Image (spheres, rainbow, N blue to C red):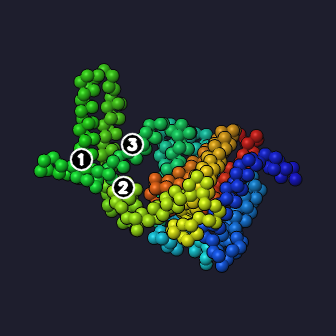
Amino acid sequence: MGRQSSIIKNLDWFTVGLFALLLLMGWLNIYSASYNVDHPSIFDNTQEYGKQFIWIITAGVLASVIMLFDGDFIRRSAPAIYGVTTFLLILVLIFGKEVNGAKAWFGFGSFGIQPSEFAKLGTSLMLAYYLNQANVRIENFRTKATSVGILALPALLILLQPDTGTVLVFTAYVLVLYREGLSGNILLLGLLAMTLSVLSLLLKATDVEFGSFSMPGHYFLMILIAVITVAVFFGIRRFVRPRFRKRNQVLLVGTALGSLLFIGTLDQIFENVLEPHQKIRINILLGLEEDPQGAGYNVKQSKTAIGSGGLLGKGYLDGTLTKYKYVPMQSTDFIFCTIGEEWGFAGSTFVVLMFVILMLRLIFIAERQRSKFTRIYGYCVACILFMHLLINVGMAIGLAPVIGIPLPFFSYGGSSLWGFTILLFILLKLDTERLVILR
């Protein structure tokens, strides 16, 4: 009895309230997005909104059960959970049900379970478990390599499904490593990679001409990088040689060679790895193609729905594009367009603000921990939420490629809801022991 009262007393009820509010708003939006006039009851389990209610109830049960576990048991179980979730990723490649071209689901009648949603839980726990070891320091190469290995194994298995959207979410862990002391140069390299990716893909579609001679634009970019590197290298050696240390020389040349290798590898991946529909979506995002009735249709309709909502929206259940199903996947990947059309700019801003407050609260919870394990895990949860919000909303307004990322607590689906509920409530459980746990 004393243990239960301690949990109730120490539980972060503000975060629980935010969770419940987002859950309720999400359920109401699913009801609106998939409303069937012949099945008006929001509890009708033959419809998506009725099924989502079942997922919500079971998520509440899961949250309650998590509160019964001991925090030390959760920490000690991290490698086992990581192993199980990784094994499920292998099994789904063999026995999984193919949905929308991806073998990412276990099918159970009309329900399905997506293991990749739980892989984020296993990876977060394992990363926190490893970095919490007494002899592990992020400054060491071995620590960096092991951390990358922990992240890469599930990411590669998910990529084989293929589910590039979830793989992209795994990049959020870089922010966790940065909080734990990873050099800011790594983030700069990431920014450089993003810049080179956009430039290379933009120039790939054009030819650079020199009189009668021409070459593909991305080859010109590679030559330009090589020429600039050589000019900078010899220019500095000539004019500021005393301050041009050998380490900086190696860094300059290494960055240039890495950039050339990255552009060449990106070209091969784009041509030989990506599916045709993925190439089209990237080209549309970059403005290299227009396909308003094909691959660009979803985004076009989503932007139209959001824009038509104006400042205050058309009103709940009164969104015309939503009501008449003009937006594909409007209860899952494009649920944000329902928010924009019916709640308007004000409602959309409120929803985003609720997510921002939740993420800031999670960072606050992480920073007040005595336990390094809990702090790292807390940042994992916050960064995963951030990446999902960034990509899903960006996708709905045409600023990110359409890669099938759910909006947490809003998009229809049990796997996503269960995954985020478990992620969140494990953190809240660990937080209830913050005054006594020192590891």
- Judged left or right of residue 127, residue 279 is left
Does residue 150 sit above or below 254 in this rendering? below
Residue type at mark 1: give it: Phe
Q: Which mark is residue 287?
A: 2
Does residue 61 sit above or below 387 in this rendering? below
Quadrant of residue 270 within the rendered picture: bottom left
Quadrant of residue 337 within the rendered picture: bottom right
Badge 2 vs badge 3, beta-carbon distance below 8 Å: no
Residue under pointer 1: 220
- Judged left or right of residue 2, residue 320 is left
Is residue 176 shown to the viewer in this render?
yes
Alpha-carbon span between mark 1 and mark 3: 18 Å
| Mark positioned earlier in the residue sequence (1 or 3) | 3
Residue under pointer 3: 192
Q: Nearer the viewer, residue 355 or 11?
A: 355
Residue at 24% over, 29% down: 234
Q: Which mark is residue 71?
A: none
| Mark positioned earlier in the residue sequence (1 or 2) | 1
Residue at 60% over, 60% down: 314
